Image (cartoon, coloured by chain):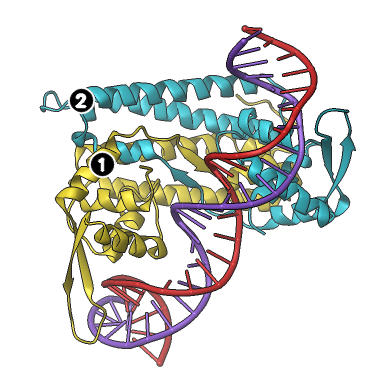
Chain colours: A yellow, B cyan, C red, D purple
Amino acid sequence: MAFDVRTLCLGILSMGEATGYEIKKVLEDGPFGHFLEASFGAIYPALSRLTDEGLVACRAETHPGRPERKIYSLTKAGQSAFDNALRSTPGPDRFRSEFLFLLLFADHLPAERLSELIDARLAEYRAKLAEMDRHDSVALSPGMRFVNGHGRAIFTAAIEYIETHRGLLERRLGGVAAE
Amino acid sequence: MAFDVRTLCLGILSMGEATGYEIKKVLEDGPFGHFLEASFGAIYPALSRLTDEGLVACRAETHPGRPERKIYSLTKAGQSAFDNALRSTPGPDRFRSEFLFLLLFADHLPAERLSELIDARLAEYRAKLAEMDRHDSVALSPGMRFVNGHGRAIFTAAIEYIETHRGLLERRLGGVAAE
DNA sequence: AGAAACATGTAATCGGTTACATGATTAT
DNA sequence: ATAATCATGTAACCGATTACATGTTTCT
């Protein structure tokens, strides 16, 4: 079994019951947000299918005048399916960056725009880092703390690298050799 | 225009003419390999379409008894299409890691298997790092050097983090508090 | 008053992977 | 001998995104 949205749902539900909406939120704002994501259009159908297959159970809370709140939880079959998925060897990490692709061709860009781009990205990274710092003050399992720390380590390294080496791209007409 | 395989091909061809096969190789082994990839099944159709649209030109070398070698190069229209694509704002970085997902549930895993997994991943990261060090000794454009250095910075940080914090996952029964 | 959060779901579309098909040459 | 590299292409399939459809409640 691959680590697709279904497995993702199983994993999140193994931490406790949740609705589709909450799964999406935890993926967006939780300590996994920097390396996991899924859209509603993927989560809801996954949850239905998982229910049909008996891997999750669904309890509905009805509030008149609005959509039901469907609270999902892992069944025993779901637990063992997930433990099974956990036994498979994880595939390679995938990192794709349009930003880095752009920087490859930094010399095709106006200097001003290049600097803007770098500043903006740096700001985003700093914001993510701050978010991760916030996560760390919340009570987390060892796995989550490790993973959150990993994210912090990587973003810190990226920021530091970009800050100290951006001159390589922005200094167009030679000059003092750095590093 | 998004940064899809077509744009990727345009970008690589802007560095010089190449065949589909070579584009794939440069993506696999070149200094971009850690954040860009594409399969033959995506590259060849992209190149055909780009030819139909007049963004690349194709010159075929025929060698009797084997498939033609089709050498592609950017046309002027292709160059401006690429410069145009470069003007668009890059989307967010996407990083997905099944490995990290697995570590989230480290407590569900047998201790031995966990250690194996970490060791294996560490070895892979070190191999990638060594590859990047090799790339750096080759003459590279500033953009490529920056990007290659960025990869090195990130992999170095990841390795160091995992090495110094793996105890958080492997030490199951409490013990000395670290960090 | 208006935006954002809460809440679920479907359908069209898409970009891309995987597997298949073919076959010569070169290195181990 | 056998595997790897060179070399191009097609077709089936897939997982997922985006946009759409709907409607309440709460915050600003």
Residue designated by label 2: B111
Q: Please tell me how crowded label 1 is: few (under 14), some (14-19), or many (20+) other residues with Cα within 10 Å.
A: many
Q: Position of residue C24 (x, y in %)?
A: 79, 22
Chain letter, disc 1 residue: A
Q: Is residue A42 left or right of residue B70?
A: left
**Distance of label 1 from label 2 (alpha carbons):** 17 Å
Place of residue B2 in the rendered image (x, y in percent of width and height, measured from the top left): 63, 56
Image quadrant holding the N terminus of chain A, namely top left
The residue type indicated by label 2 comes to: Ala
Q: Could you say whether the residue bearing mark 1 is in a helix, strand or loop?
A: helix
Res A64 → quadrant = bottom left
At x 34%, y 65%, the residue is A44
Residue that appears at 45% across and 34% down: A92
**Which secondary structure, mark 2?**
helix
Which percent across, then down, holds residue B112? 23, 22
Q: Point out which mark residue A144 bears.
A: 1
**Crowd rating for badge 2 (residues with CA inside 10 Å; few <14, some 14–19, many 20+):** some
Q: Residue at x 77, y 49 (%)?
A: B48
- Determine the image quadrant of residue A167: top right
Which amino acid does the dot numbered 1 rest on? Met
* Rendering coords of residue B138 (x, y %): 70, 21
User: In this picture, is C28 found above or below B57?
Assistant: above
Question: Which chain letter goes with mark 2?
Answer: B
Q: Is residue B126 visible?
A: yes
Q: Is residue B70 rendered to the left or right of residue B148?
A: right
Depth check, front residue: A126 or B90: B90
